[in-house]
Image (cartoon, rainbow, N blue to C red):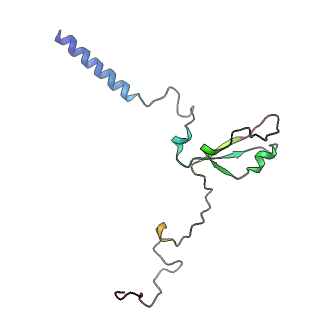
Amino acid sequence: MIKVLLFAVIALLLIWIYLRMNQGRSSGSSDDRKLPATDRGEFHAVAIRFSEHACAAAKRHAGERFLASESPELPLQDCDVAKCECYFAHYDDRRSGYDRRSPFDPALGSSGTGLHEIERRQSGGRRKDD
């Protein structure tokens, strides 16, 4: 009786371990499924890509990126093409790469004073202990 009970406990433990190890796996491969926008990052963005025969509505959004959660649905409401071939291009960030921040901002990790490698100021500060 004890051997049967011990065997049942071990079997249940092994089943539990097996289920826990396979809990995060899906039936399809990761390439077959699309991740929701929340799994791609907080600033996951999309841009509308279109062919040369696209409608004027799509061309108005050329070069524009939208947060994935705020993007318009395709086909666009003003689309007047019989078969819409527009699609979304995905980006990790809504920003396009052009950075307007100053490279001299100390918050960006720059400890220099612009283009000069050495400190050129001669006088001390206005405080008594400078």
Q: Is residue 119 above or below residue 81?
A: below
Q: Quadrant of the N terminus?
A: top left
Q: For the stretch drawn in magenta, what is the main secondary structure?
A: loop
Count the labels in the image.
0
In x, y percent, where is residue 21?
37, 29
Residue at screen point 70% across, 45% down: 48
In x, y percent, where is residue 26?
48, 28
Is 73 situated left or right of 95 in this image?
right
Residue at screen point 47% across, 76% down: 112
In x, y percent, where is residue 73?
69, 39
Residue at screen point 23% across, 15% down: 7
Is 19 situated left or right of 96 in this image?
left
In x, y percent, where is residue 29?
52, 30
- Indicate yes or no whether the magenta region holds residue 84: yes
Q: 14 or 42, which is in the foreground?
A: 42
Q: Is residue 27 above or below residue 49?
A: above
Query: Residue lying furthest left in this view?
Result: 2
Q: Quadrant of the C terminus?
A: bottom left
Q: Quadrant of residue 75?
A: top right
Q: 56 or 54, which is in the foreground?
A: 56
Residue bounds of the magenta highlight: 79-86
Is 20 situated left or right of 61 in this image?
left
Q: Quadrant of residue 79?
A: top right
Q: Is residue 16 above or below residue 66?
A: above
Q: 38 or 9, which is in the foreground?
A: 38
Residue at screen point 53% across, 43% down: 40
